[in-house]
Amino acid sequence: MRAFLALLRRDLVLAARIGGSGGLGLVFFLMIVAVIPFALGPDLNLLSRIGPAILWIAALLSTLVGLDRLFQADEEDGSLDLLRLSGTPLEILVLAKATAHWLTTGLPLAVASPLFGLLLALEPAAMATSLVSLLVGTPALSFLGAIGAALTASLRRGGLILAILVLPFAIPVLIFGVAASDPAAEARAQALLFLGALTLIAGVVGTLAAAAALRSRE
Amino acid sequence: MTRLTVSDLACRRAGRLVLRGVGFSLEAGDALVVTGRNGAGKSTLLALLAGVLRPDAGTIAFEAPGEATLPESVHWLAAKDGLKAQLTARENLLFASACLGGGLSADAALARVGLAAGADLPTAYLSSGQRRRLTLARLLASRRPVWLLDEPTNALDSQGQALLADLLREHRADGGIVVAATHLPLALPEARELALGPAATAERDA
């Protein structure tokens, strides 16, 4: 437990320091959301209809950016070996790192999404539902990403492989995330429940799989 | 009684037999100096003892008071030093002692290795000798009985080497075990020596 908290705090501090990954995802998110209205043209109805989908695509892509450093940075400087000697199960350490990753990428994205929704001409109701669906769904992206990050921890240019590995597993999250963001949809509540289930499953499977991947690395 | 017994250890990396037939037995207060040319398997042996690599043959047995396993009882001062450049020296030590267990307070450990003035500097600003001193402080900030040291004198000035010799002597007097891989003479009185010969490395697996 002590190692869990220490690792969580260390990763949050590292993300906040200069050269950390703290603002990266948020800026990438802003770029995608800001560029799309220019590309689509002045059709506000179209924009507000596809707005939640754009928010979700942007959230997915900006989670993938920088994810390759999740374990690679620790692998390169030897912190991962130090962590392995701590006697704390690797699953706990993966849980701490994935949680820190979500707190520094998914959570800020979700919280900032109503603001970005303004750029996409979202109705207030759609802003609220998008916010909730992002809050519920983005942890799944961090945990699924942790599997890919652990598998590519010792690859120098693992980012591309990681994205290809993770993307298919993230598709269900995207589908239910967008479905849960549409305030007019009848099945919104069900989609949100499915999204929550996906997050819980990803939390368990992602933690176990990433720890196994780290263990099997030579 | 702390006892580390290794018998007939062999390890293959990337299809190449790096270590073969390595065996030794160390008790509290003992030190082992592992020598050998570059690529002879010195670091591999330390990684095996740290439990990060698995041996292909042979056994590593560790007895200690309590139930601590070997990986939970070692300090591994490896080539990759495990320090985060963005964290200050003190933060690095606090993190290490949260992970590896308690010992001297971070400030006391830093003072012992002569880094008290640099406690609040980001590690990125430290010289390589100061980084090495910081890893020595880590040995003190969490108490663990077995020290695995990979070229511990690297980047250390003569004062730093004297400091290292002091730390090693105190650790052994305290009932600790030291395994050091080095190609430079170390101030380790009455240490046993294990020369990893080229025979093991020249051997290729068919």
Image (cartoon, helix red, strand yellow):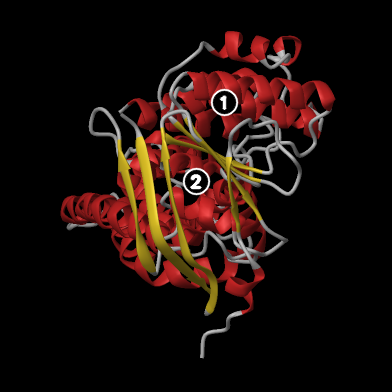
Percent across and percent down for residue A12 are: 51, 31
Up the image or down, A212 lies above or below A193; here it is below
Asked if one can make out residue A117 in the rendered structure from this viewpoint, the answer is no
Mark 2, secondary structure of its residue: helix
Q: Of residues A204 and A74, which is closer to you in this image?
A: A74
* Residue identified by numbered label 2: A81
At label 2, the amino acid type is Asp
Mark 1, secondary structure of its residue: helix
Q: Of residues B131 and B29, which is closer to you in this image?
A: B29
**Residue at horizontal 49 percent and vertical 34 percent from the top:** B30
Up the image or down, B68 lies above or below B197; here it is above
* Residue identified by numbered label 1: B138
Percent across and percent down for residue A212 are: 33, 59
Q: Quadrant of residue A191?
A: bottom left
**Residue at horizontal 69 percent and vertical 34 percent from the top:** B85
Percent across and percent down for residue B18 are: 56, 69
**Residue at horizontal 61 percent and vertical 21 percent from the top:** B167
Up the image or down, B68 lies above or below B142; here it is below
